[in-house]
Image (cartoon, rainbow, N blue to C red):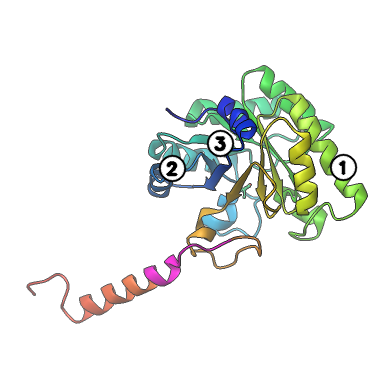
Amino acid sequence: MPVTTQELSQWKQQGRRITVLTAYEYAIAQLIDQAGIDIILVGDSLAMVGLGYDTTLPLTLDEIIHHAKAVRRGVKQALLVVDLPFLTYQESPQQAIHSAGRILKETGAQGVKLEGGYPLMAETVGQLVQVGIPVMGHVGLTPQSVHQFGGYRKQGKTSDQAERIIAEAIALEQAGAFSVVLEHIPSDLAEDITQKLGIPTIGIGAGGGCDGQVLVTSDILGLSAWQPPFAKTYTNLQQTITQAVQEFCIEVREGKFPPGN
Ligand code: KIV
């Protein structure tokens, strides 16, 4: 049976850790779905990882919908969540409903993710949930605010910041979010938030005390030119691809491929 948002809270109660990876296209989505991942996120990291931009800010709603449709065709089991790109939801709850509605209608995703806490985002999440759109929150280092943070820096290091992040996570839960991503914050803060919330927290660079973990797939595959210090590389596809391409070039140039020349 495909994963549902309802199951995630039960898993939290049972202490079953939740696994989340990103995907931006059909083939990778199909592979990671068949390998048993719980949630596939069409993250707006697509802008940097898949489209070569310096930040996530330039990504459009049409671009993420185009990629999410391809991912949907590859996903049979995992819960599919799609990021709302920068300035497709911050202007008003109505703008958020329009953008998130397009994502659900056009891609077949089961939920959306948005960045930020209260007061505006909690109100927006409340209205999205009221019209039946499941929402995953995202607090801590929210990459769409990179220029406000002055870089991709760890957040929540001062007590004021930490209190703000705790309040945001609680406000998102009260507004009806089904889960919250905690990005690049101290592990004790992430653990504290995880204990305070009934909905699952999904950590990235937030230590081992969260209910689940998310990473960018190209980072775990060793495909990224740059990756954050908290990512883990499980294989080196950069090397594998380079070797395969070099062998192909040599074989074609030497007349060894196709065989029988
Ligand atoms: O855009 C993304 O890929 C994300 C995850 C890394 C949480 O937001």
* Residue 8 screen position, x and y as percent: 59, 31
Q: Which mark is residue 120?
A: none
Tell me, yes or no, whether the highlighted magenta stretch contains residue 31. no
Query: What residue is at 49 percent from the left and 47 percent from the top?
Result: 24
* Residue 92 screen position, x and y as percent: 76, 29
| Residue 148 horizontal side relative to residue 6, left or right | right
Q: Secondary structure at mark 1?
A: helix
Q: Which residues are magenta?
A: 232-241
First reached walking from the N terminus: tag 2 or tag 3:
2
Tell me, yes or no, whether the highlighted magenta stretch contains residue 235. yes
Asked which quadrant contains residue 184, the reply is bottom right
Q: Which residue in the protein does label 2 denote?
A: 36
Q: Secondary structure at mark 2?
A: loop
Q: Spatial distance from mark 1 to mark 2, Cα to Cα?
A: 35 Å
* Residue 254 screen position, x and y as percent: 19, 82
Amino acid type, mark 2: Gly
| Residue 94 horizontal side relative to residue 226, left or right | right
Q: Residues within 10 Å of mark 2 (few under 14, many from 20)?
A: few
Closer-to-camera residue (238/10): 10
Query: What residue is at 52 percent from the left and 38 percent from the top?
Result: 65
Up-down: is 210 above or below 232?
A: above
Up-down: is 155 above or below 88?
A: below
Q: Is residue 51 visible?
A: no
Q: Which residue in the protein does label 1 denote?
A: 164
Q: Nearer the viewer, mark 1 or mark 2?
A: 2
Q: Which residue in the protein does label 3 denote?
A: 81
